[in-house]
Amino acid sequence: MASTGEILKKENILVNLPSESKEEAIRRAGGLLQSLGYVNSNYTNGMLAREKVHTTYLDNEVAIPHGVEEVKHEVIKAGIVVLLYPNGIDYGDGNIAKLLIGIAAQNNEHIDVISKLAIIIDDEQKIADLISSNDVETVYGYLKKEVTHGSIAFWSRKYRSWIYR
């Protein structure tokens, strides 16, 4: 499994982005994953396809766009990108996303990181602090700290149960 340092780097974080459409934001996340060497070019199309099947909007103004199973072979190595939209983007169904975490992973490489991020996602104050930050160093330091330690049990709203890793 890739280490947190390989999955999340400072250059993976974009802050204070202007509002754009959901499709543009997903394309931006996919393009950043590609430019950083995590995925091949077709992965972004898989991210857009995922969104047509099921929304990747979670809760608390957070979305986690990622590719469908059919594009897993486009992943070179596991990685995440973080995009902050202070004014939000319309994610459909009345949902406004201000924090997008684009994910690239094969198999279950990303589960540990996402399970730890889920703890942050469920904390409205932590999300508000992240969204209001316009400093890459602050966002990176905070996410790295949260992702590299802490509980790896989280409540799954989808499955309505605790997930333990």
Image (cartoon, rainbow, N blue to C red):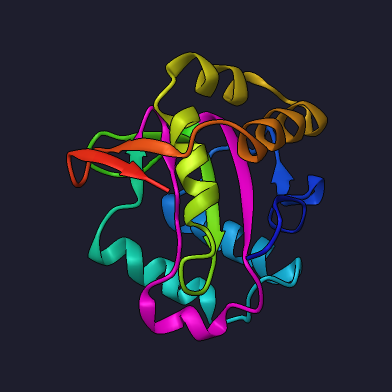
Q: Nearer the viewer, residue 60 or 162?
A: 162
Q: Is residue 89 visible?
A: no
Residue drawn at point x = 24 percent, y = 66 percent: 53
Q: Is residue 131 above or below residue 125?
A: below
Q: Is residue 127 above or below residue 103?
A: above
Q: Give the x, y percent position of residue 55.
A: 29, 53
Q: In the shown orientation, is residue 164 left or right of residue 119?
A: left
Q: In the shown orientation, is residue 142 left or right of residue 42?
A: right
Residue drawn at point x = 75 percent, y = 58 percent: 6
Q: Give the x, y percent position of residue 138.
A: 77, 26
Q: Is-magenta flag for residue 62?
A: yes
Residue drawn at point x = 32 percent, y = 44 percent: 163
Q: In the shown orientation, is residue 54 left or right of residue 136?
A: left
Q: Is-magenta flag for residue 68?
A: yes
| Region rendered in magenta | 59-87
Position of the N terminus, as image quadrant, is bottom right
Residue at the left extreme of this rendering: 160
